[in-house]
Image: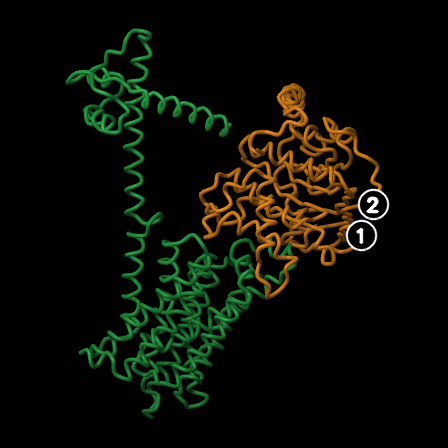
Chain colours: A green, B orange
Amino acid sequence: MLASVFNHTTITIATGAAVLGAVSGALGSFAVLRRQSLIGDAISHAALPGIVMAFILTGSKSPLVLMLGAGVAGLTGMLVVMLISSSNRVKYDSALGIVLSVFFGFGLVLLTWIQKRPEAAQAGLDRFLFGQAAALLRRDVWALATIAAVSFIVLAMLWKEFKILAFDRDYGVSLGLPMRRLDVLLTGLITVAIVLGLQTVGVVLMSAMIIAPASAARQWTNRLGRMVLLAGVFGAIAGVIGAVASSTIPRLPTGPSIVLAVGVIVIISLALAPGRGLISETLRRRKNHKKLRLDAVLTDLYELESQHTPETPHGHTAKAIQAMSFGEGEVLKNLLELESRGLVARFSTNHWAITEKGRHRVERLVQQLDSSAGAAH
Amino acid sequence: MSKPPETPSKGLAIDVSDVTVAYHDRPVLWDVDLEVPAGVLLAIAGPNGAGKTTLIKTILGLVKPAAGRVLIHGAPYREQRALTAYVPQRGSVDWDFPTQALDVVMMGTYGKLGWLRRPGAKQKEIATHCLERLGMADYRHRQISQLSGGQQQRVFLARALAQDAQVYLMDEPFQGVDATTERAIIDLLRDLRSQGRTVVVVHHDLQTIPEYFDWVTLINVRRIASGPVSTTFNQENLRRTYGGRVAFLSSRENGCAEKATALSDVQTPPGEKPGWMA
C-alpha cells in the first residue's frame, strides 16, 4: 500500500490534483465573496459540449485539445450569461441556471450520439462526468502547473483591483477602474481554474472545488489575502487526498473522492474555527449568558444593600435575592461563583453581602448601560 | 443656521444640463439642470423614487443618461475623476467581507496609485489619518462586520477623504447613524467647506437641512428648485416637490423651527472638540 502511494504515477496524479485544488480554491474565494457560487456549476456544465465538440472536430483525446474545447465552451457560456442578465429582465442566477442546463443538455446529447458510433476511439469521454485522475500524464501536469502559475501571477498583479471589484464595484467605477473588463478577466480566470479541474474532478462536481475550499477558509480568517491563500491550501490538500485515494483503491472515481475530502475540511472548519465556528459561537453565547446571570444577581444584591445604608452591612440570604429576580433556583450557584471571583462575600452560612470590588463592577455596568443608551439614540 | 453662501467666485463645481435618465421606459430623471457653485454644502432632497441617488450616480458616470451632459469643474467626469470622491449608501456592500477598516479606507488611495502598484506605508499613513479625523483610529484593525452601522458609515467617509478630492458626492450618509456619527459627519462637512471643497449630499431629513447645509436642490424626477437654503427651502417649493403632503410638511416645518433652536443650544461651543476627537 505505502509503496503504491509513493510510486511515480501516484506522485504525478497527486501533483496535478494539488495544482488544480490550489487554483480553484484561490479563485473560488472571489466567486464566493461575490455571491456567485453558482458560477462554478454553470461554467463546468457549460464546458461539456466543448469537450465533445473538440473531440468530434479533431478526433484527438489529448487533454490539451479537450481542455481548449472546454475552455471555449465555458467562456461562451459565461458571455451568454452576462448578455442575458444585462439586456433582458432575467436575473443573474436564473441566467446561470438557463445556461447550465441548456449547455449541459446539449453536451449529453452529443456524448450519447458519439457513443453510438461504431469506432472505439470515443471511449472514455464520459469519464469527464465524474473525473478520472489516473489519465493524468506527466506532461499534462506540467501544462496544468504552467497555466496555474500564469493565473496566480495575474491574480497577484491585479490584486487590489479584484479586491475592489469583489467588495464595492460601483466605487471602483467611480475611481476610474474598468470594472467590466476586470469582471470578464476574473470570470475568465475562474473558467480556466474549472477547465483545469475537469479531467480530474469531472463536470458534475467541479463546482464544489470552487465553493468548498473558499467557504472553509472564510471561517478561519478575516483578511482577504489569508482567505485566498488558505482556500488554495485546502483545495490542494483535498486534491491530493482524493487523487491518491482513487488511484490506490480500484474503481473509486476521483471527483467524488476529492469532493468528499474537501467536504470533511468544510465540516471541520464550520465546527471548529475560532470566532466563526459553531462550537466557539456556542461557547461564547454560554459565557455571555452566564455573565448576564451573574451580573443580574450582583445588581440585585447591590440594590438590596442600597435600601438600608448607612447601616452596617449585614448580608442577605439567597432567598431574599431570589425573590427579586424571577429565580430559577440558580441563585445560590451564582452566588458561589461570584464569591470565587471576590465580588461577594459570605457573612454566615447563608448570608451574602457585596464586596467593594462588586460594588465597583455594578457602578461600571450602570455607566456602560447609560452611555450605550445615549449612543443608540 | 449656516452662513449665507458666497457668490461662486471659483465657478461651477458641478454643471448638469438637460439630463434625462430612464430605466426601461420609465423616466427617473427628466430634463434636469443643476448648477453647483464651488465650495458649497448642497443637500439633494425629494420623495422616495424622486431620482436622488440616480442623479449623483449620473454625475459620477455610474449611470449613463439617455440625454444631457455633466461637467465637473468644466470638464467631463472621465477627465476629472481625480477631483471627485464618492460615498455610496452603506447598504450597497456586504459588510461581512473579510477585510479591516484600514484596508477599506486604503481603497481611497487606489485611484492615484495606478496599476501594478501595491499600497505601502504612505497609503497606510493617509488612511490612518483619515480614520483619525472621523474618530475611528482605534477601530482601524477591526473586521468591518464588527463595526456598528455608524462606524461603518464613518469608514466609508474616511475612504472618500483619503481620495483628497475637490468634489464629494455622498449618498445618504446620515441614514440610520448614531448621534456620535452624525456629529462627526457634520464636523467633516464643515471642515471640507472651510477648505473650499464642494459637498453634495443626498439627504432625507428635511428638518435638518437648514441647519446642516447652505444650498439645497429639490427634485422629483424633474428639478423643482435649486439655490441657497435661505431663499429656496420654503413652503411653496416643498409643496411642489412633495405634492399633496403639504399639511404634514407645514406642521413638520413648525416643529422643525423648535428643534433647530433646541439643537443649536446643545451645539459644541467653538474651540471645544467633542469627546471622540480626543
Q: Which residue is mark 2?
A: B11
Considering the image in quadrants, where does the N terminus of chain A appear?
Answer: bottom left
Residue A242 falls left or right of residue B239: left
Chain ID of residue with mark 2: B
Confirm whether circles 2 and 1 share one chain.
Answer: yes
Chain ID of residue with mark 1: B
Q: Which residue is mark 1?
A: B74
Q: State the image quarter where residue B207 is shown.
A: top right
Q: State the image quarter where residue A336 is shown.
A: top left
Return the x and y of residue B173 as percentages of the image width and height: 60, 39
- Count neighbours of disc 2 (C-alpha within 10 A) and say few if under 14, some if 14 to 19, many if 20 or more: some
Disc 2 and disc 1 in contact, CB within 8 angstroms? yes
Residue A335 visible in the displayed image: yes
Return the x and y of residue A371 as percentages of the image width and height: 47, 26
Return the x and y of residue B264 as percentages of the image width and height: 66, 22
Circle 1: element type: loop
Residue lying furthest left in this view?
A: A349
Q: Residue at x 57, y 52 (%)?
A: B124
Return the x and y of residue A347 as percentages of the image width and height: 20, 16
Which one is nearer the viewer's eye here, A101 or B137?
Answer: B137
Q: As displayed, is residue A272 above or below residue B152?
A: below
How many labels sit on residues? Answer: 2
Q: State the image quarter where residue A369 is shown.
A: top left
Distance, label 2 to label 1, CA atoms, is: 9 Å
Q: As displayed, is residue A133 above or below residue A335?
A: below
Residue B247 visible in the displayed image: no
Disc 2 residue type? Gly
Disc 1 residue type? Gly
Q: Residue at x 60, y 32 (%)?
A: B183
Which one is nearer the viewer's eye here, A360 or A186?
Answer: A360
